[in-house]
Image (spheres, helix red, strand yellow):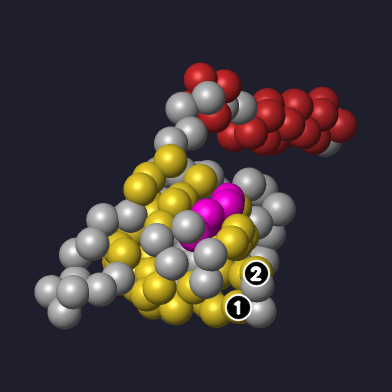
Amino acid sequence: MTRRPFLLLFAVLALAVGISACGGDDDDAAEETTTEATTTHEDGGGAHLTLTADPGGALSFDQTELTAAAGEVTIELVNESATPHNVEVEGNGVEEVSDTISESTTELTLTLEPGEYEFYCAVPGHREAGMEGTLTVE
């Protein structure tokens, strides 16, 4: 028996697995949500936002648009998966990144002026896969 039919079968199976891993439900993309910040600091200031990475390890956040009042803004990143993630905020002279975490939470606290900022996962390849959004500070 030659190896050629075996290799062809293996290649077809590998391709099928790769294609199925890339598939997704388009309805999920349509369910993007915007979160208004809530004041949670007892010292009387600041906004607290929660951003959650996909618990199954997919390269996505649960939100692509966040809104907060100007001043101190804390973004809590929740990552229940083993895939490492972080959150970076960039714009208007700001460029700060949180710790990179797996199966944990972390916080990034910034002082932000009104304007639009980008947030994204700075782990190589994650932003390019869609882990990004806009933070509007009013």
| Residue type highlighted by circle 2 | Gly
- Given contact means CB atoms under 8 Å apart, are the residues at marks 2 and 1 in contact? yes
Q: Within 10 angstroms of label 2, few (less than 14), some, or many (20 or more) residues?
A: some
Q: Is residue 135 magenta?
A: yes
Q: Residue, x 51% and y 46% (percent of image)?
A: 65
Tell me the quarter of the picture where residue 99 sits: bottom left
Along the line of sight, which residue is nearer the eye, 6 or 133? 133
Q: Percent position (x, y) of residue 125?
A: 68, 59
Q: Percent position (x, y) of residue 11?
A: 77, 33
| Residue that carries the numbered disc 2 in the rendered image | 91
Q: Residue, x 38% and y 52% (percent of image)?
A: 52
What segment carries the magenta color?
133-137
Q: Is mark 2 on a helix, strand or loop?
A: strand
Q: Within 10 angstroms of label 1, few (less than 14), some, or many (20 or more) residues?
A: some
Task: Specify the farthest residue to the left.
Answer: 42
| Residue type highlighted by circle 1 | Val
Q: Quadrant of the N terminus?
A: top right
Q: Can residue 57 be seen in this view?
A: no
| Residue that carries the numbered disc 1 in the rendered image | 94
